[in-house]
Image: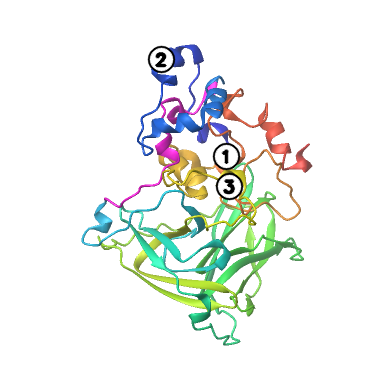
Amino acid sequence: MAAPKYLVLATGLAAALAALGPAAHSAPAADPNDPEACYECHKQECDESLAKPFIHLPFLRRECHVCHLAPTRTATKGARGRATTDMPRNLRWLGESGLAQPEHVFVIPPADVDDVLYVKASNGHGGLVSEQLDLPPLEDLPPLVNDHTPPRIADLKVKEVRRGVFYSATIAWRTDEVADSRVLYGVGAMDNESPTDNDLSLKHEVLLSGLKAKTTYSFRVASQDMFGNRSESQAMELSTATSVSPVEVAAEAGSEVIELEHTILRNGDRYLVRFAANQPVRLAVGAPPPVRTAAAPEPRARASKPDDHPPLRSELETNITICYTCHKEAKDVLSHPVNVYPREGMTIPEEYNTLEDGRITCNSCHADHGASIEFRLRKPSKKELCIGCHKDLA
């Protein structure tokens, strides 16, 4: 990942802290929605980061809300004429779609929710809407019926071949029912396999990274539906000798009002929630923490927040999406792939932060708030940073 592309630096710590003045360590406002209140609970972490010579500029400005806080109420043109729901405090995001499309499906274990689910949809043009869904008892729902028919794969193509830190290729296809995504590939024999993207979708994109220069690869794609019915495509080829740029398609003007419909079914011992929108949207679902009994184990530390904590953005938003709002150039040829799983057999060092499911983010290579190394790298040099994952480069 090219460090300069992902961060804003604040050097000269003495001058920066002087500019902040005494207010930098003053008591925060009482309103828990005020980002200044972050300092009250996160004082130790804030002080440690502020003592570093390279600091993320929003953090230096005490603008925690920019990266971390989710909007509590929709106030954009996309929700005009439609009632929206306040997002609760202490919300946990359970799933988030990677691609904008009209249909989304989430499979949710009952242990992750009590009786309520929250959904947030955005169309990428300023439209945002949030809703609350009441979940009925699982045993009262009709079960899904296995039709024993595998997904039909169509529109298979090599969407992009590019040289970044490494050569990479994006493979895209569609299926006629929601299914997962996987690519088998290799030079001659297809003995490599991408990590399976378990997001159930009609629209599929898988990025293959770490490819060799001027090399022809064979590949085929596979998709499996929620019942295990699986299809594989015919074999195709891609070459890293020539770059392939994605065809720019003018975005269709979406309706000012995002309309969502949902269906809740039973998939074995889990909820299956299907959303249909009137336009392509990105969609995330979340829930408040389930009520814990005395015998229930404590949740992991980063999920433990006060009940009145302001709602947070999802991990994907905080660690990838928000970065692009300031660093639009980060998608150019020098950047490292993000929102992708590591290659088969690759071990990501524990100190390289990833999403819960293992996907690589901007913060895998760059420290969140402050660091002692230029560009907030997690290692003293770019080479040492790369070798952390790519042992073959040592």
Q: Earlier in the sequence, mark 1 or mark 2?
A: 2
Q: Which mark is residue 337?
A: 3
Residue that numbered label 1 is attached to: 363
Q: Earlier in the sequence, mark 3 or mark 1?
A: 3
Work out whether 104 lies above or below 88: below
Mark 3 to mark 2 CA distance (whole Å)? 41 Å
Q: Is residue 50 above or below residue 341?
A: above
Q: CA distance from mark 1 to mark 2?
A: 30 Å
Q: Quadrant of the N terminus?
A: top right
What's the amino acid at mark 3?
A: Pro
Instruction: Determine whether 156 is above or below 253 in the image.
Output: below
Q: How many discs mark residues in the rendered view? A: 3
Q: Nearer the viewer, residue 191 or 366?
A: 366
Lateral position of residue 65 relative to residue 298, left or right: left
Kindly indicate whether the residue at mark 2 contacts the one at mark 3 (C-beta within 8 angstroms).
Answer: no
Query: Which residue is at 69% across, 37% downward?
Result: 386
Identify the residue at horizontal 73%, vertical 43% (top origin). Answer: 390
In terms of image quadrants, where is residue 283? bottom left
- Which disc number belongs to residue 340? none
Out of 211 and 72, give the one closest to the viewer: 72
Q: Quadrant of residue 310?
A: top left
59 magenta-colored: yes
Three-letter amino acid code at the position of disc 1:
Asn
First to last magenta residue range: 54-75
Q: Is residue 312 left or right of residue 77?
A: right
1 and 2 marks in contact (CB < 8 Å): no
For label 2, the residue is: 22
What is the quadrant of residue 184 in the picture? bottom right
Q: Is 230 within the magenta?
A: no
Nearer-N-terminus badge (3/2)? 2
Residue placed most toward the observer, 392 or 376: 376
Q: Are marks 3 and 1 in contact (CB under 8 Å)?
A: no
